[in-house]
Image: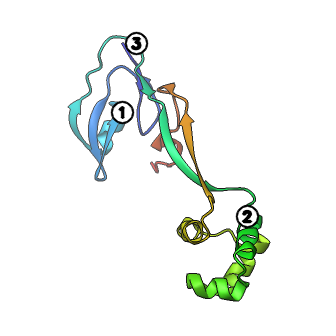
Amino acid sequence: MIKINCDLCGKVGNSLNRALIEGVELNVCSGCSKFGKVLAPIKRNVGKEPTKEFPPKEEKVELLVEDYAEVIKKRRESMGLTQKEFANKINEKEITIHKIETGTLTPPLSLARKLEKILGIKLIEEYLEKQESFKRAKTEGFTLGDFIKIKK
């Protein structure tokens, strides 16, 4: 039989009750049941400790190329535009273009897409990030009883 801990005192036992204590449903031992209203006994299945298996997750991540400042500046200059002319063309402030080209400002993805379209360059790269699957068994941890003091 699987033994679980009381949510209040942490006592390990086979027979726990589901109880409503101060508006919260908890799994408590018979000693802690007196602090609330017992709703039902908890029945446990005989067997091995339950484990949760999390499948691997894949997520697309969009990131700017590392040398975005240099790429933008070279392309703007090859088009024969000053920072002021270029800023007016894309409806941005000149200081924003200056900071992007010096690398002190990382453009948000929306602005980077606008720059890609107007300059005809590739600034955003997509990466496929994969997280490993893992199994996690239920571990003994803190209970509410670890954090409260009962006055007698």
Q: How are the residues colored? A: rainbow
What residue is rendered at 28% in x and 53% in y?
23
Indicate which disc, 1 or 2, sits on the residue closer to the N terminus: 1
Residue 99, horizontal then vertical, whole percent: 74, 77
Question: Of circles 2 and 3, which is in front?
Answer: 2
Q: Which one is in front, 37 or 152?
A: 37
**Residue 42 vertical position relative to residue 77 in the rendered view, above or below:** above
Q: Residue 71 carries which label?
A: 2
How much space separates mark 2 and mark 3, taking CA atoms?
A: 59 Å
Residue labelled with disc 1: 31
Residue that appears at 75% across and 75% down: 77
Q: Is residue 48 above or below residue 88?
A: above
> Residue 103 occupies which quadrant of the picture?
bottom right
Disc 2, SS:
helix
Specify whether residue 127 is in view.
yes
Circle 3 — which element? loop
Q: Residue 60 or 52: which is nearer the viewer?
A: 60
Task: Give the spatial CA distance, label 1 vs label 3.
Answer: 27 Å
Residue hosting label 3? 48
Q: What residue type is labelled 3?
A: Lys
Lower position in the chain sequence, tag 1 or tag 3: 1
Q: How far apart are marks 1 and 2 (CA)?
A: 70 Å
